Image: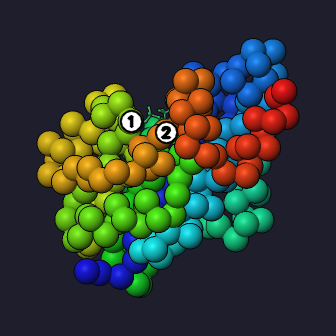
Amino acid sequence: MTAGSHLLVPIKPLRLAKSRLLGAADAGRGRPDAHAALVAAVALDTVRAARLAPGVAEVVVVTSDPALTDAFAAEGVEVLADAPAAGLNAALRHGAELLERRPGVSRIGALQADLPALRPDELGAALRAAGDERAFCADRAGTGTTLLLAAPGTPLDPRFGPGSAAAHAASGGKALDGPWDSLRCDVDTAADLAAATALGVGVNTAHRLREQD
Ligand SMILES: Nc1nc2c(ncn2[C@@H]2O[C@H](COP(=O)(O)OP(=O)(O)OP(=O)(O)O)[C@@H](O)[C@H]2O)c(=O)[nH]1
Ligand SMILES: C=C(OP(=O)(O)O)C(=O)O
């Protein structure tokens, strides 16, 4: 087993992110600031939990959003700017290429930013289960990917997007299929948010959801 993993967490500019969640933060009243605040809260909870997971050496956010950059910097989280409008996989490749050059970086992974119920122990268990192989964890639906891990010393080769679980399997990824509901529960829709709430969301997300009442 190698040293801890460096996990990249990509996040679109807040005004563009999570379009399918629009309205969930403000009971459909259409306030973009409430939507942005919910997306940021979900990302903060995800990153906080990931940083506490056994086997995680460092979490690095990839975003060009100025408000998110400030919020993560205040938490002591490194933020890499992605190439504007290059898309998710390009942002991850860019981040991975920067990390690969650093001494002490062995295994690189990508973690989705929309896991507000994430539990550090469940992420740690998934990292252990991956061993030293390329591996991925599918989302609740089984079609998307919430976590992708490169084999140590190899490129990340991210294939996120529709059907990414199958694409990560086809590119040699081992499917991680443990009982890690919190790692699988990404929130793209209001129904996903309800599922995450049932599992128990982090403090920032819980606060935002209370604000809407
Ligand atoms: N840094 C960066 N992150 C991205 C980019 N595109 C997508 N992401 C992030 O990657 C994850 C999955 O992205 P998508 O499925 O495209 O979009 P989404 O924001 O989850 O939701 P929808 O707008 O509802 O499709 C989210 O955390 C996004 O914020 C990008 O160009 N740069
Ligand atoms: C891009 C992906 O995530 P989302 O569920 O946010 O579309 C994916 O799972 O590959």
Mark 2, residue position: 186
Q: Report if residue 58 is visible in the image.
A: yes
Q: Residue at x 58, y 61 (%)?
A: 49
- For label 2, the crowd category at 10 Å Cα-Cα, with few meaning under 14, some 14 to 19 and many 20 or more, is many
The CA span between labels 2 and 1 is 7 Å
Q: Residue at x 31, y 69 (%)?
A: 128
Please give the label number shown on residue 140: 1
Q: Residue at x 66, y 51 (%)?
A: 202
Q: Is mark 2 within 8 Å of ligand 2?
A: yes
Q: Amino acid at mark 1?
A: Arg
- Quadrant assignment, res 166: top left
Q: Residue at x 84, y 27 (%)?
A: 213
Way the structure is coloured: rainbow
Q: Secondary structure at mark 1?
A: loop
Q: Is residue 88 above or below residue 6?
A: above
Q: Quadrant of ligand 2?
A: top left
Q: Amino acid at mark 2?
A: Asp
Q: Choose the circle earlier in sequence order: 2 or 1.
A: 1
